[in-house]
Amino acid sequence: MANLTEHASHDMGMHTEQLEGRTQQRFFSATEGENLTQPFTYEVDFDRATEFDAQDLSTGEINNKLRQLMKDGYGSITMRNPGAKHSLAVGILNRLNLVLDGSLGYFGCGLLDGPNVHITGRVGWSCAENMMAGTVVIEKNAGSTFGAAIRGGDLVCRGSVGARTGIDQKGGTIIVGGDTGAFSGFMMQRGRMVVLGNAGKNLGDSMYDGTLYIGGKIADLGVDAVAEDMTQLDIDWLTAKLALYDMSAPNGIENMTKIVSGKQLWNYDNLEPSEKKLVL
Amino acid sequence: MCGIAGLIHRGSTDNIGEEMTAMLQAMKHRGPDSTGFALYNEGRSKTKYVMRFKVAEGAEARSGFEIQAQMAERKKAVDSRLKELGVEVEKRKSVTEYAFRYEIKFAGDLRELASYVEDIDNVEILSIGHALELVKDLGDATVVAKQYGLSKFKGTHAIGHTRMATESDVDIRSAHPYWAYPFSDVAVVHNGQLTNYWTMRRAMERRGHRFTSDCDSELIAVYIADAIDGGEDLETAMRRSIDELDGVFTYLIATSDQLGMAKDVMSAKPMVLYESDDFVGLASEEMAIRSIFPHEIDTFDPYEGEVRVWQT
């Protein structure tokens, strides 16, 4: 494998953020760039619209149907009657306007990289986990681990969500119109989470980085999560972001509580484990 | 993993056998080992009960040369002991070769009755209820429902369980629901793991309660039975359980006229809830509720540490 320079990897679009730390490795080779392919991505035309009924189809059949429609060039697809089935509309890696007219079960819209998804019903656990880009907007409620480990894009739920929202969030934005459950923002690493209602206990527990904005009451903060003053930059960003989705903070954006990492946990210690052993 | 489900028709009855079968079958992927139902009708008079019991495990009934004779002996012993206690058996039904349904008339102490009958080796009472009938066996929901003829069971409410065995055997003894022995109409289903099971089990055994299995879920039934025995109402007992049971759990409990749910403080196990004026449906997955309401419905996840109780 050839040596990889930081510059080359950035040119290849493989890093969106500068990772730091002595143990971070460089995984990609610049010389492999030409060999990298993007399977299952399609050129679609947003003006070509179609719809289908998912009621009598299995999860596999539905996802294959979506893939076939994208392959055929449809850029605007409406799926009727998803029927709360699990793992629907996953792994879509290109731009697409997708309307899911109904509710999804668990692991819906996972691993997305680009599409704009509108869900008219509710979603179960782990909606949009590992999303990389695009938007997912849910009109009703969502289950637990909403937006687990998302890396990018906007994930919006107009209703309330369950526990562990944005667990291991690595980027992007999560917006919740109602309340969120316990352990929201657990081990958050990057990105922003906006909750317009109340937050359950242990909010932001063990968060490394990132920012939480809470509009209502906070049951309690987790380990190393601390409140910080809102800045004008925060207010401007929230105003613009919420306007995108026609949402507003019931008590005013300026009265929201901003939570960040206190950066006192062991992972902020600069010592390598072997060095720490010596010290101890 | 396991899947649990509950439903309650408020102020009416319906074919709950068929409804619960559909809900549990929709969650077969969460646990294919065994399926159980606790079905409640409108109830009988104070001295009339349905007693469900088994004289062998299903697998045991299909093995060995002498088992048929042994099962007949065990059943004979049950009949003899019932007679001894002055129990009047109004109807006898052999549901399978090892499971029986008796309609009985009895005015005495249920604990004494249950203890005396279960003292016979390999005999287990699944339930004794005015309103409750508890059925559980190996296989998925449609298999068990067909085997026990549940397709036309009319009633007010029900809870059910589809089990993936993790900590105890694949047998009827370890299947859910658990009857809260010896309280006539209390049954429990559970999804999760209780980490202080042995400590609490020993404490319960010292208080005179009996356990039929090594399944941690049985502890919840015994715990609630103990609380009711101490004069606590269902909701208070459930709220206390949130603090005292350690581990991750979501459980459903039913009495003759109530259905309750409780979720641990970590909210680690799923539960989806649908509530309308005349119906409440709960399940580990929305798909189960959709099996009886195929159209769009508004559902939500109850939060951590939440306890809810509904009345028929």
Image (cartoon, rainbow, N blue to C red):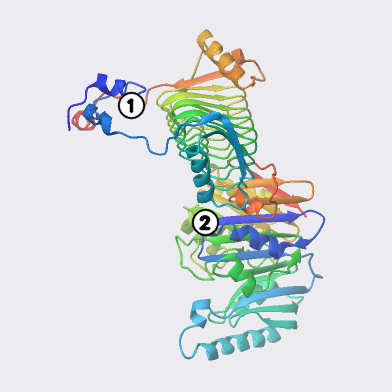
Would you call the spot at circle 1 few (<14 residues within 10 Å), some (14-19), or many (20 or more)?
Answer: few
Q: Specify the label residue A119 is tagged with.
A: none
Q: Callout 2, which amino acid?
A: Arg
* Residues behind callouts 1 and 2 on a single chain: no
Would you call the spot at circle 2 few (<14 residues within 10 Å), some (14-19), or many (20 or more)?
Answer: some
Residue annotated with mark 2: B30
Q: Quadrant of the C terminus of chain B?
A: bottom right
Element marked by disc 2? helix
x, y percent for residue A95 = 49, 29
Residue annotated with mark 1: A14
Count the marks: how many? 2
Q: Residue at x 69, y 82 (%)?
A: B93
Q: CA distance from mark 1 to mark 2?
A: 38 Å
Q: Callout 1, which amino acid?
A: Met
On the question of residue A213 being in view, the answer is yes
Q: Residue at x 62, y 43 (%)?
A: B306
Q: Residue at x 61, y 59 (%)?
A: B24
From the viewer's side, name the closer residue of A45 and B175: A45
Residue A188 location, quadrant: top left
Residue A177 location, quadrant: top right
Chain ID at mark 1: A
